[in-house]
Image (cartoon, rainbow, N blue to C red):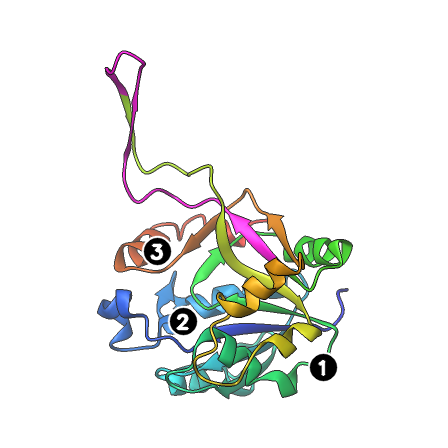
Amino acid sequence: MPEKMHAVILCGGMGLRLREETDRVPKPMVEVCGKPILWHIMDCYARHGFKSFILCTGYKGGAIRDYFGGGRNIGKGWDVIVEDTGLDSQTGSRIKRVEKHITEDNFFVTYGDGLTDAPLDALLAYHRKQKTIGTLTAVHPHSKWGLIQAGTDGIVQRFVEKPVLADFINGGYFVFKREFLGLLSSDASCVLEKEPLNALVGKRQLSMFVHEGFWHAMDTYKDYVDLNAMCKNMPWAKR
């Protein structure tokens, strides 16, 4: 079995692009297939043997505490810490504010709005092999628009409806050595994706774990609809 490692899940944002749902509940509590998307993220970790979680709350955080606090309503044997990290805190600040709970040499960080079938045990193994301070999961995004393919003669050959793109983006599933916490600040303005990650890039201390499988974030109402349309197969729950 994997060692005990915390997954720090960022759950504090306001979800402004999903106001149809987030006026009622915080974004991680928006339901996908009858359960909060946060539950599915945690279940993904648990299926790979990682069952210790730190939930960094902010906006409407009471709803997350009521559902997950002390492991209530879960029945999964998960170890859950729910920590209020401030209403206006940025991502780096939220992680720094739960530092006292992170005692292991490595820890996961994940956004509370993205689902994947990435092998998280393999992510950890790759991180250790690379021996870098941080490792991010790189995924292929879907185009938000249909693309046009044309021949050299300028004649349209076909339309491709919102294909998966060849480029990579940050899929939001990280592993960090504990020393990374020294690059973060508890100041509310500390953004994980700016100075802290760029500092690792400058030191050649950020690795990229490539995942070619399923990944889908819930940024907009359309994403919410799309994910709920996948309930019969739930591709994020397959290994």
Residue drawn at 49 percent across, 64 percent down = 40
Q: Amino acid at mark 1?
A: Thr
Residue depth check, mark 2 versus mark 1: number of the one nearer the observer:
1
Comes first in the chain, label 2 or label 1 = 2
**Which of the 4 image quarters holds residue 90?**
bottom left
**Can you identify the residue that label 3 sits on?**
228
201 or 56, nearer to the observer: 201
The residue identified by callout 2 is 28
Instruction: Give SS at disc 1.
Output: loop
Kind of residue at disc 3: Asn
The answer to whether the residues at label 3 and label 2 have Cβ atoms under 8 Å apart is: no
Discs 3/2, front: 2
In percent of width and height, residue 197 lies at 56, 64
Give the mark, 3 or 1, whose residue is nearer the N terminus.
Answer: 1
The residue singled out by tag 1 in the image is: 103
Residue 77 position (above or below residue 20): below
Q: How far apart are labels 3 and 2 at the CA level?
A: 14 Å
Q: Residues within 10 Å of mark 1 (few under 14, many from 20)?
A: few
Please rate how many residues cluster around mark 3, counting C-alpha atoms within 10 Å: few if below 14, some from 14 to 19, many from 20. Answer: some
- The residue most toward the top is 153
**Quadrant of residue 207 within the rendered picture:** bottom right
**Looking at the image, is 127 positioned above or below residue 14?**
above
Single out the mark in the foreground, 3 or 1.
1
Which of the two residues, 238 or 17, is positioned nearer the viewer here? 17
The answer to whether 144 appears left or right of 237 in the picture is left
Report the number of numbered marks: 3
Q: Is residue 77 visible?
A: no
Image point (56%, 69%), residue name: 196
Q: Earlier in the sequence, mark 3 or mark 2?
A: 2
